[in-house]
């Protein structure tokens, strides 16, 4: 385990309500192929901090990688709703694009 992952895991333990640390740790987990650990972290953010907009794209993409296309689609749609609520046009655009690509793949 890299020192970066150890540092982030410690930060998550010390600051369990900090979505940034969880999100960053999840991204590091993905880099080393620990998809399920990343999934748990991303899903925890969704439950505890639903306005943490970056999680929707990455969790949706992870669901696609895990061949959970329906969950991915739901995640993108929910992310688009949140992006609208918090008026984040950039995140909305990325999520719309990911949703469109997935819908084409599912047809």
Image: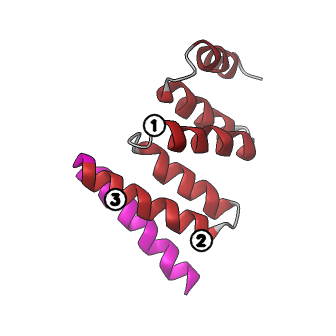
What number is the disc on residue 35?
Answer: none
Q: Position of residue 15 (x, y in %)?
A: 55, 16
* Label tally: 3
**Residue 20 image position (x, y, % from top left):** 48, 28
Identify the residue position indicated by label 2 in the image. 70
> Which residue sits at x=51%, y=36%?
48
Across and down, in percent, residue 81 comes to: 34, 59
Closer to viewer: mark 1 or mark 2: 1
Q: Is residue 33 at all visible to an observer of this figure?
A: no
Apparent side of residue 92 relative to residue 6 in the rendered image (left or right):
left
Residue drawn 65% across and 14% down? 10
Q: Which mark is residue 81?
A: 3
Q: Mark 1 points at which residue?
A: 49
Considering the numbered disc 3 on the image, is that residue within a helix, a strand or a loop? helix
Q: How crowded is mark 2: few (under 14 residues within 10 Å), some or many (20 or more)?
A: some
Which tag, 3 or 2, sits closer to the chain's start? 2
């Amino acid at each position: 385990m890299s020192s970066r992952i150890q540092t982030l895991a410690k930060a998550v333990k010390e600051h369990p309500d900090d979505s940034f640390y969880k999100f960053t740790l999840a991204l590091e987990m993905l880099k080393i192929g620990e998809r399920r650990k990343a999934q748990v972290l991303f899903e925890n953010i969704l439950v505890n901090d639903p306005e943490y907009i970056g999680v929707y794209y990455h969790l949706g993409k992870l669901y696609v990688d895990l061949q959970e296309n329906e969950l991915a689609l739901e995640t993108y749609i929910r992310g688009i709703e949140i992006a609208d609520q918090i008026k984040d046009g950039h995140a909305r655009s990325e999520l719309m694009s990911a949703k469109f690509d997935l819908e084409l793949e599912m047809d």
